[in-house]
Image (cartoon, rainbow, N blue to C red):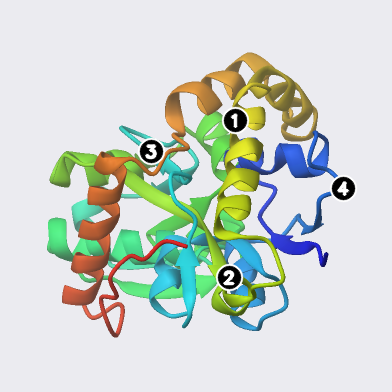
Amino acid sequence: MTKLKIAASTYLNSAPLIYSFLKGSLKNTCQFLGDTAPARCADLLRENLVDVALIPVIEYQSIKQIYLIPDIAVAAKEFVQSVILVTKCPINKLETVTLDTSSRTSATLIKIILEKFYQVKPKYITTQPNLTEMLKQSDAALIIGDPAIKIRKEHYQTYQIYDLAEEWRKFTSLPFVFACWAINLPWSDNQNSLSRFDIISLFTQAKEEGLGLLGEIAKDYSRSLEIGDNLLLDYLTNSVNYDLDEENLAGLTLFYKLAFECGLIKENRIIEFI
């Protein structure tokens, strides 16, 4: 049987969902492509170079013939810490914002927050994530993933830092979903490959195993991020949520609705699961 080809970012926030494929019991079950920016994972799925990818949720609206895998997500109930807007002035005074190219979901989210919630319409610049260079060009910088965790720790007294999940919750009273597993239709239509039940079971098993190893994951990432494993364990336990439950799904549905209203997506496609 052909192995599934999987792509996912290896940022800390994704680690509990992929750790089993990298170092756990599912290590040899799939062809895993890691250490990739979330936006690039979506591109690999769009180009049919992988079967399943952990994609920024906004990409679901632009990639045809894909389905989401149920009950699994990278989300935040209240705050997230790893998706931030770093500003040199109050958020309602922004005239220019530099966007991190790593995730199109976060770029869409900040536009909704600024334009829909704060009634601010700044000029946007897209570049590689480097805080110093980004803030030379603009009033604010959008940073995601592991760099955001480090910046939040090192620059909290230097700049104003806004947690985008916290801002979303403040205005909507809902959680925010950043990423989901998505699968290409050709694979899910292939009767000679894994069944729908097999695929869901595989990713559910990976999630459950990863959530049981949060302490080990925190220690692994502590070395590369140079942040204490206790802080990273707190992040994994209290900031990130890995479910696509009813409340998270309501937040995702509203995100798509507002993105469509703001003209940030061409259609508001209904959420469909494998």
Residue found at x 67% / y 75% = 44
The residue singled out by tag 3 in the image is 76
Q: Nearer the viewer, residue 152 or 253?
A: 253
Q: Are marks 3 and 2 in contact (CB under 8 Å)?
A: no
Q: Is residue 163 above or below residue 96?
A: above
Q: Secondary structure at mark 1?
A: helix
Q: Which disc, if any, is residue 119?
A: none
Question: Can the viewer see residue 75 in this picture?
Answer: yes
The residue singled out by tag 4 in the image is 28
Q: CA distance from mark 1 to mark 4?
A: 17 Å
Dot 1 surroundings within 10 Å: few (below 14), some, or many (20 or more)? some
Residue found at x 22% / y 49% = 250
Q: CA distance from mark 2 to mark 4?
A: 21 Å
Q: Secondary structure at mark 3?
A: strand
Question: Can the viewer see residue 113 in this picture?
Answer: no
The amino acid pointed to by label 4 is: Asn
Q: Nearer the viewer, mark 1 or mark 2?
A: 2
